[in-house]
Amino acid sequence: MSFENKIMEKKLKRILHEGAAALPVQAFFWNIAFHKELKKERVISSAHRTSEYTLHTFYKPISIHLNLKIYDTGI
Amino acid sequence: MTQVFKRVEECPPVKGFRRSIIYDLSRKTYHFIPHALHSVLTEHEGQTIEEVKLAFDSPLVIDEYFEFLLENEYIFLFSKEEYDQFRPLTFNWDYPALITNAILCRDGNSTYDLKEVFSQIENLGCRHVLLFSKVALDFSYFETLLHDLNVSSFQSIEIHTCQHESLHLRNLRRFVDNYPRVRAFIVHSAAENRIFCAKNQPYGIIAYVREQGDLSRNSGTSLCDYFNVNIQLFSEAQQHNVFYNRKLIVDASGRIRNTLIGEEPEYFVGLDNIRQVVETHHFQRLWKIPKDSIEVCKDCEFRYMCTDSRIPIQTQDGTWHFETECAYNPYLAKWKGEKGYQPLQSPAGI
């Protein structure tokens, strides 16, 4: 990987790894070679997020009448 | 080559009265920052570090700021040509459904048809439901219900119910394993407080708690326990009340409501056509009151991550406020119980 691509990897790491599933527009691609890497990481990232969080959890509490954090976990 | 700094659009800085916060929406966390750093991010974006230093008195502090920002990947350094290719991210919020979440209540006198309600709110696009029972219900009741919902499009279901002898751990473990859309099964009035997680998945929580279930009261703990940093909530909070927006409540007697407490208008009766009620302006009256419009909250740095079930009240001059005080005083940046905290109503509170 060329020096420019390494720099680009660093710059886009955040977008690829953390925000790909939710992020609509910010990613942009100058470099075709790097684009391939991007697609691969994006798939991994999306799969991870979907399986654990996105499908089965709501992004905010429905009710706040009971705070489970104050109780000790049993196991 | 001269490099300018670009803030990551998913990390917006938000100014409070006494301090600011960077919301890290993609990593679902936040960092407190001083107002000066907020000013760097909002007023000097697109400049070089040297240019920013010229605008402030203490260049060493600016160096520390940029070290912090780069380390946490809140900013990146780009050439001017690269910088110009970025577009701002807008936080407009919408959701392809009239209702996003619902609370369905049951007690010993409830006669309304729960299946019919589930069917109607599913048609409204609702995908997240909290089922709350004030009375003890047999385990088989929940099994039948979830079995019926197996082919539905609900994504998460929380169940809060009173203790019943059939709701023992072995049954509930099997239950949350079999029905992955059950995100939490909370048993109230239990003999002891215990929390368990489901065996095969990270999201099925089983909890036994001693206290009696009461939806109409807040948990009495700090609202910070209900802070969520994510792009959906942040976007929704820009223009909406995140607790009441697109929420539907069916109380134990089968009346449709938009709040947990308070007097419900007389036409909130009957479950024949939930859509008709939900589409009324009066039902939606709390939906578009963001914290930016509410006194005190508008000065709070947590305003886009806080889920707060208090009902905003409008005064005659058109401003909004809450009748009860929050556990956090944004004018002092102190939580109740913290050293130096003063309630808002005290002379030193503001």
Image (cartoon, coloured by chain):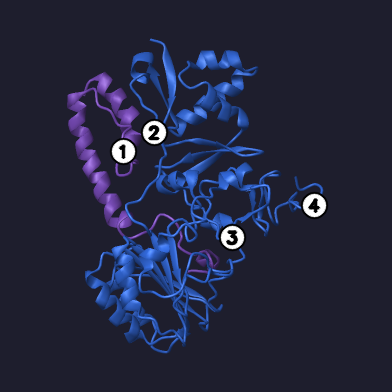
Chain colours: A purple, B blue
Chain holding disc 1: A
Q: Residue furthest right?
A: B347
Q: Look at mark 1 in the image and give the residue it sits on.
A: A24
| Residue count near mark 1 (Cα–Cα under 10 Å), binned few <14, some 14–19, many ≥20 | few
Amino acid identity at mark 4: Ser
**Tag 2 secondary structure:** loop
Quadrant of the rendered structure where residue B137 is?
A: bottom left
Q: Is residue B41 left or right of residue B349?
A: left
Amino acid identity at mark 2: Leu
* Mark 1–mark 4 distance (CA, rounded to whole Å): 46 Å
* Mark 3–mark 2 distance (CA, rounded to whole Å): 30 Å
Same chain for the residues under marks 3 and 4 in the image: yes
Q: Look at mark 2 in the image and give the residue it sits on.
A: B89
Give how far across and how far down residue B70 sits, in percent: 45, 28
Give how far across and how far down residue B259 sits, in percent: 52, 65
**Tag 1 secondary structure:** loop
Q: Look at mark 3 in the image and give the residue it sits on.
A: B310
Q: Look at mark 4 in the image and give the residue it sits on.
A: B346
**Tag 3 secondary structure:** loop
Same chain for the residues under marks 2 and 1 in the image: no
Mark toward the viewer: 3 or 4: 3
Confirm whether residue B204 shows in the render.
no
Callout 1–callout 4 Cβ contact below 8 Å: no
